[in-house]
Image (cartoon, rainbow, N blue to C red):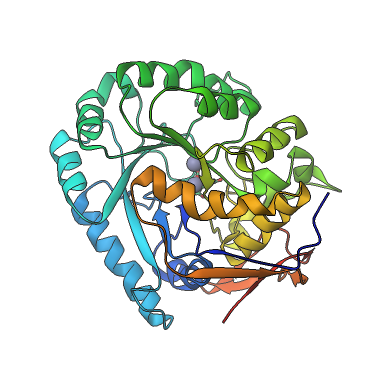
C-alpha cells in the first residue's frame, strides 16, 4: 500500500517522550535525538529520580553541557523537563514547576511498573490529590505510564486494566487535568483516548506501530525488542497505526527511546527499553508508508504535540528520502555499546542531513 513518493519534507518534529539518562550515556545518546528533533520531553526516571524543580534545572544544565560537548548549540535542541511524581510531591513544588520555564509536565510512574520506578506513586488518588489539584489549576500536564502493577494481572492486560482502575477514576476526579497517556499500546487505550472527554492525548512509539509481540520471539528470545509496555498482538498494532494516521489530533510522536547498555539487555533479567533515537523518523516513516499515510506524518510528528502542550510549532524542516538506511549492529556508548532497535536491518526511508 506504500506510495511512490520519493521525498517528504515536514516541519521539524519533536519527541514527546524520551529517555536521555545521565553521565556518560547522556553524552553518547543526546546527539542522536538532536539530529532529528527540535525539542523533547525528557523523562525524569534517573537514579535518584528528578523530583524537584531544582533537580530539573540541574539536569537540564547537564543536558545542555552534553549537547555542547557534542558540538550542538542550545538553540538547536531544547530539552523540555519533567518532574517525577511521588507520594510526597507537594502542591508548592507543582506550583514552582508550573511557574518555571523549564518544567513542562509531571510524570506518573506507578511504583514498580518499569525501569527506575521504585520511588513512584503507590496510591494516586489516596496520596496525590493536592498535587493533582495544583496541576489541574495551573494547566501542567500529567504524563502517565499507564500500567497497573498488580502481579496477578496478565502483563499483556496491564494497560487495559489501568484504564478502568486508575485512568477513569482520575479523570472523573480531575476532569480538567491535562493527561498524556504515554506510549499507548492497545486498542482499548486507543478507544479510550479517542473518545474521552476533556484534555487527553497520547504518545505512540515507532516500535509499537511497526511490531507485534511475535518480534520478541522471532527465532529465539530477542531482548532488544523488549520494552514496557510490552509489544502486543497484531490487532493492537493495527489500532495504533490507524489512530496515529487518523484525523484525530490527540495522538502524537513519542519515541520512548530508552538506552540500556548491551550487557543489561542481553542478560538473564534484561532491562526493558528499546533504543530508537538514532533512526526514529526512519522508523515512523516506514510505519506511515506501510498504510499509504505519509501525508499524515506531519500532523503526528510536528503539529499535534505542540498543540496539546500549548507550544508553537518548530520553524525548521526535516526531509526524508526513500533510500535504504542500514541500522548499525551496535553503537559505542558509555564505554560499552548500545544495540539499536532493528540492528542490522535495512529500513526503506532515510533522513537527509544538511
Ligand atoms: N519503556 C521502557 O521499556 N523503559 C523505560 C521506562 C518507561 O518508559 O517505562 C526506561 O526508562 O528504560
Ligand atoms: Zn513508561
Ligand atoms: Zn519511557
Give the residue drawn at x 61%, y 53%. 297
Q: Is residue 176 above or below residue 117?
A: above
Tell me residue 291's x, y (percent). Answer: 76, 46
Tell me residue 279's x, y (percent). Answer: 63, 64
Give the residue drawn at x 67%, y 62%. 282
Give the residue drawn at x 15%, y 46%. 96
Q: Nearer the viewer, residue 268 or 236?
A: 236
Query: Would residue 225 appear left or right of 1 to someone viewing this image?
Result: left
Tell me residue 230's x, y (percent). Answer: 63, 38
Q: Is residue 258 above or below residue 158?
A: below
Tell me residue 210's x, y (percent). Answer: 72, 47
Q: Looking at the rendering, which quadrant does residue 123 occupy?
A: top left
Q: Is residue 287 above or below residue 250?
A: below
Q: Looking at the rendering, which quadrant does residue 186 occupy?
A: top right
Give the residue drawn at x 47%, y 58%. 14
Query: Would residue 327 appear left or right of 47 to someone viewing this image?
Result: right
Amino acid at each position: 500500500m506504500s506510495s511512490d513518493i520519493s521525498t517528504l519534507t515536514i516541519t521539524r518534529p519533536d519527541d514527546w517522550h524520551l529517555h536521555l539518562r545521565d553521565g556518560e550515556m547522556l553524552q553518547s545518546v543526546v546527539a542522536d535525538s538532536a539530529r532529528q528533533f527540535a525539542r523533547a520531553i525528557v523523562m525524569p526516571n534517573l537514579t535518584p529520580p528528578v523530583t524537584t524543580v531544582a533537580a530539573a534545572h540541574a539536569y537540564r544544565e547537564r543536558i545542555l553541557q552534553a549537547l555542547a560537548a557534542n558540538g550542538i548549540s542550545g538553540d538547536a535542541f531544547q530539552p523540555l523537563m519533567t518532574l517525577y511524581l511521588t507520594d510526597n510531591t507537594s502542591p508548592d513544588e507543582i506550583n514552582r514547576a508550573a511557574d518555571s520555564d523549564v518544567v513542562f509536565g509531571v510524570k506518573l510512574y506507578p511504583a514498580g511498573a518499569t525501569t527506575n520506578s521504585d520511588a513512584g506513586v503507590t496510591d494516586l488518588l489516596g496520596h496525590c490529590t493536592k498535587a493533582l489539584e495544583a496541576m489541574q489549576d495551573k494547566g501542567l500536564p500529567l504524563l502517565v505510564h499507564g500500567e497497573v502493577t498488580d502481579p496477578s494481572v496478565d502483563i499483556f492486560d496491564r494497560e487495559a486494566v489501568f484504564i478502568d482502575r486508575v485512568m477513569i477514576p482520575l479523570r472523573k476526579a480531575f476532569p480538567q487535568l491535562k493527561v498524556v497517556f504515554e506510549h499507548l499500546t492497545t486498542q482499548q487505550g486507543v478507544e479510550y483516548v479517542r473518545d474521552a472527554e476533556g484534555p487527553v492525548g497520547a504518545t505512540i512509539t515507532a516500535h509499537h506501530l511497526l511490531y507485534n509481540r511475535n518480534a520478541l520471539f522471532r527465532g529465539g528470545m530477542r531482548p532488544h525488542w523488549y520494552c514496557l509496555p510490552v509489544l502486543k498482538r497484531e490487532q493492537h498494532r493495527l489500532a495504533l497505526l490507524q489512530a496515529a494516521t487518523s484525523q484525530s489530533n490527540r495522538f502524537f510522536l513519542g519515541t520512548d527511546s530508552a538506552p540500556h547498555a548491551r550487557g543489561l539487555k542481553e542478560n538473564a533479567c534484561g532491562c526493558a527499553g528499546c533504543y530508537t533515537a538514532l533512526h526514529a523518523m526512519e522508523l515512523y516513516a516506514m510505519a506511515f508508508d506501510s498504510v499509504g499515510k505519509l501525508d499524515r506524518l506531519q500532523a503526528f510528528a510536528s503539529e499535534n504535540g505542540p498543540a496539546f502542550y500549548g507550544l508553537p510549532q518548530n520553524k525548521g524542516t526535516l526531509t526524508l528520502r526513500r533510500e535504504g538506511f542500514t541500522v548499525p549492529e551496535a553503537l559505542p556508548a558509555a564505554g560499552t555499546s548500545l544495540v539499536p532497535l532493528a540492528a542490522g536491518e535495512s529500513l526503506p526511508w532515510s533522513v537527509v542531513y544538511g
